[in-house]
């Protein structure tokens, strides 16, 4: 049994708690939350902060506000625990680097919660691109168009830029794109906030140039209830209805692929020939559960983190560049 403590009981924290409770190989060793009502559990003890924890633990799942990630992760590693840190790894590049330095100093392991890498459809997409069946990737187009309910922003830390869709949502897409195409060497963009008018980015567009030569355009907004976005298309989130609509298209020299349907287009040598379509067959699974199972393997020494702290820093670095490039006029970071 792998003994896990969960810090934070918000939207993602509750999902972690439910999956740990239901898993036969995982034990919920405790809950950390400053609110005594939110840390109450039928069988696991609750603690106001990490210093109060007095039970055996193998790993800490950090699902708290972003600015607390670095201090919690460092404190946990200094106590001898491995950590699973929800995205983004930290609020700033310097804070993320402090997590990396602490891991190297303590010898502990850090897994970053970019759980999409554990999604079977993302795994199949990455394998398809990596094996070169469709030739060299040339470009891609990605959409993330959702409308968050107004009450989502009632929580204080979401009122400003930390609640914008770039750092909170697009960072997942950025990590997935980096897993597919490698490092990003240039970012340009534009953004605005015309609907709610709050001090944060609401919508925008960005273009990423990867060192491999791939050019990716990203369009995003948290003010429009469309069927186009990773969560809606895959059904990954129980809070977002499953639309099964594609939100990512990748063009390669020998064909193309749409995601999440995994419709593969191939067989045409030029625009004079008709491409043929087929769909990849993939078994479904819950990525958050698979990520927790992977975390248990990392703790036991059976695996290295699929998403390392350095991967998390890379995704954060690109996301911060997108955030800066799409900042509305009059809004500061």
Image (cartoon, grey):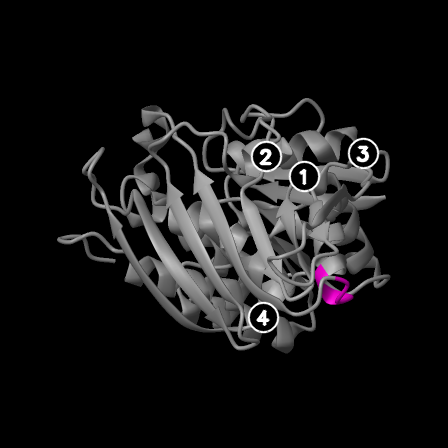
In which quadrant will I find the N terminus?
Answer: top right
Q: Earlier in the sequence, mark 3 or mark 2?
A: 3
Q: Earlier in the sequence, mark 1 or mark 4?
A: 1
Relative to 328, residue 7 above or below: above
Q: Give the number of the mark in front: 4 or 2.
A: 2
SS at mark 2? helix
The answer for how far apart the CA atoms under marks 4 and 2 are is 28 Å
Q: Is residue 160 left or right of residue 7?
A: left
Residue topped by disc 3: 23
Residue topped by disc 4: 310
Q: Which mark is residue 261?
A: 1
The answer for how far apart the CA atoms under marks 1 and 3 are is 29 Å
Residue in view at x 46 percent, y 45 percent? 143
The answer for how far apart the CA atoms under marks 3 and 2 are is 26 Å
In which quadrant will I find the C terminus?
Answer: bottom left
Residue topped by disc 2: 233
Q: Nearer the viewer, residue 11 or 236?
A: 236
SS at mark 3? loop
Q: Earlier in the sequence, mark 2 or mark 1?
A: 2
């Amino acid at each position: 049994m792998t003994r896990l403590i969960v810090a934070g009981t918000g939207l993602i924290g509750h999902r972690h708690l439910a999956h740990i409770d239901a898993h036969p190989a995982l034990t919920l060793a405790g809950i950390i939350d400053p609110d005594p009502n939110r840390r109450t559990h039928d069988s696991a003890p609750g603690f106001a902060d990490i210093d109060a924890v007095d039970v055996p633990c193998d790993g800490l799942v950090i699902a708290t506000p972003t600015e607390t990630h670095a201090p919690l992760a460092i404190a946990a590693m200094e106590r001898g625990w491995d950590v699973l840190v929800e995205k983004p790894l930290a609020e700033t590049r310097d804070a993320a680097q402090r997590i990396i330095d602490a891991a190297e100093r303590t010898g502990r392991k850090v897994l970053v919660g970019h759980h999409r890498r554990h999604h079977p459809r993302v795994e199949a997409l990455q394998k398809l691109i990596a094996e070169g069946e469709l030739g060299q990737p040339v470009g891609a187009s990605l959409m993330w168009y959702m409308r968050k309910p107004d009450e989502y922003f009632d929580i204080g830390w979401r009122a400003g830029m930390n609640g914008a869709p770039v750092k909170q949502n697009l960072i997942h897409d950025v990590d997935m794109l980096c897993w597919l195409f490698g490092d990003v060497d240039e970012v340009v963009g534009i953004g605005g906030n015309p609907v709610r008018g709050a001090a944060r980015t609401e919508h925008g567009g960005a273009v990423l140039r990867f060192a491999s030569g791939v050019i990716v355009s990203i369009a995003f907004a948290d003010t429009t209830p469309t069927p186009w976005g990773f969560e809606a298309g895959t059904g990954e989130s129980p809070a977002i209805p499953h639309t099964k609509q594609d939100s990512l298209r990748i063009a390669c020299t020998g064909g193309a692929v749409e995601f999440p349907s995994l419709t593969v287009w191939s067989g045409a040598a030029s625009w004079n020939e008709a491409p043929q379509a087929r769909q990849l067959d993939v078994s479904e699974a819950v990525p958050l559960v698979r990520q927790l199972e992977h975390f248990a393997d990392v703790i036991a020494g059976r695996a290295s983190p699929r998403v390392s702290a350095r991967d998390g820093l890379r995704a954060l670095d690109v996301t911060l560049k997108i955030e800066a490039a799409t900042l509305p006029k009059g809004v500061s970071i």
